[in-house]
Structures are given as structure tokens and as C-alpha cells.
Image (cartoon, rainbow, N blue to C red):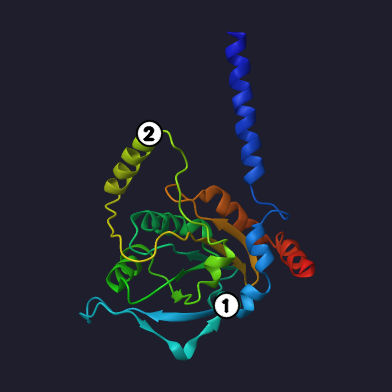
Amino acid sequence: MTMILLLFLLLQTMTLARALAVLPNATNMISSNLRSALPGLLDDTKLTPLDFPYAEVEQTKHVSESKDAIVSLRQAAKDLAGPAGSLCFVVRRPGCTLCRQHALQLKESAGSLKDFALWAIVKETGVDDEGLIEFHDKYFDYPTFKDEERAVYTAFGSRKIGLTTWNPFRLYQGYKDLKKKLKEKNIDGNFKGEGFIQGGLLLFDRDGNLQYSYDEQVGTDFEMDIIIAAAKLVASGEAATAGSETKAEL
């Protein structure tokens, strides 16, 4: 009995240690890949605003690009900012069911992120405009921009999707759990477009400065408690030091 209790306490301690390790603070807010890309990423990355057809009025399945309104990543974040800043969803593939699940997670957590404007970045248009429109209309109806050069994805490390385990039983169980979750939430999708290079989340302050990043892990839910904790740090001003230190280092 004593051994079981000790084992339980050890597991609890390890779980707590992991939580403390990943919980954002003023020194670990931005991943190393993105940190090395600053500040050029913010000012040199060009984003094209996308215009979506009104489903009730237009029958077209074409997404338009506002080429005359191209802005930098920093300017987009600044223009869209809410009272505390903005949260950008860097989408791997709009037609992907997993990306759509992530989008719903963010929408469902909007109440806890009310001081941050939500928006999105995608890689491409003209490949699956129908899927992109569906993503926007049903799952993430916020301002969306195209990163034609994929500069943001490169800054994330151009991380490709891969297996998290080679255990066939865990893979099968994970597939069953995921399939059940998607069915319960009535999420469908397709396989069109580039879907190997992963994205993530970028959290900006009101001035368009990057304050926090979160790497997408395919097949894993966003850890919204961690993301919301980071948002609270930014909203309180406690993360401002991390932003200024990043600029000073580069």
C-alpha cells in the first residue's frame, strides 16, 4: 500500500513539474525558431487580405485577394488588435478536419480571450477555395490573410507532420478517439492542398509585437489553459519585458 501511495505521489509530482515547465512566463514565451526570426519576421513578412463571398448572395466558390491592401505581419496584428492585442491562428490546411477542430477550440474559448482579436493566416488560395470558404464560414469566421511566401511557416521551423508513436495499438486507439470526437462535433473536411508543414498560434500585444508563440502538434488538441495563461500575461503587461528583451537580443 505504501509503495502504491509513493508511486502515485511520484506521478503527481512529475505531472506538476511538466505543467510548470510548459506554463508560459516572461522568459519562455516565444519559441527559439521564431525568436531567431525576429524582428524581420514582423516587418518583412507581407500578408494579403482575403475577401470571402457572402453565402446568401453569391454562388461563387472563389476567394479574392486584396492585392492593393498588402500589409506586414506587425501592421496586420496592430490594425486588428483588441484592447489587449490579437491572437493569430497560422493554419496548416483549411480543409483539414484537425485544423477545423483547432479552429473550434479557439472559437469556444473566445470568452476567455475577449480582449484579443482573433484572425488567421493561410498558405494558399486557388487550390481549395471551397474548403477555405467553408473553413471561414463554419469554423473560423475571422479576418484571414494569405502568406504567399510562407514566411511565417518558415519561422515556425517548417516543421513537418509525423507520427508521435510507432505503437500500433496507441495509433489505432488514437484514431478511434479522434474519429469519435470529430463525429460528435460534426466536423468534416478534405485532403486538398499542402498539409504537411505545420503552423501554430501567434499572440501579439496592441502594438503588433509578438509576445507568445505556440507550435501546432498534429492530432493533439490546443492546450487552451496554457494559451489563455499566456494571454493573461500579455494583457496584464507582464510579458512586455519578454518582447523588449527579444528585440534587444537581435
Q: Which residue is mark 1?
A: 45
Secondary structure beneath dot 2 equals helix
Residue at position x 53%, y 62% in the image: 158
Of 98 and 84, nearer the camera is: 98
Disc 2/disc 1 C-alpha distance (Å): 41 Å
Of 6 and 171, nearer the camera is: 171
Q: Quadrant of residue 42?
A: bottom right
Quadrant the N terminus occupies? top right
Q: Residue 220 location, x and y as percent? A: 45, 47
Q: Residues within 10 Å of mark 1 (few under 14, many from 20)?
A: some
Secondary structure beneath dot 1 equals loop
Q: Which residue is mark 2?
A: 168
Q: Amino acid at mark 1?
A: Thr
- Vertical arrangement, residue 231 with respect to residue 247, above or below: above
Q: Residues within 10 Å of mark 2 (few under 14, many from 20)?
A: few
Residue at position x 60%, y 33% in the image: 15
Residue furthest out toward the front: 166
Please indicate whether residue 213 sits to the left or right of residue 117 in the image: right
Please indicate whether residue 180 sits to the left or right of residue 66 in the image: left
Is residue 235 visible in the rendered image? The answer is no
- Which of the two marks, 2 or 1, is nearer to us in this view? 2
Mark number, residue 53: none
Q: Is the C-beta separation of discs 2 and 1 under 8 Å?
A: no
- Vertical arrangement, residue 246 with respect to residue 79, above or below: above
Q: Amino acid at mark 2?
A: Pro
Q: Quadrant of residue 50?
A: bottom left
Please indicate whether residue 98 sits to the left or right of residue 25 in the image: left
Of 200 and 151, nearer the camera is: 151
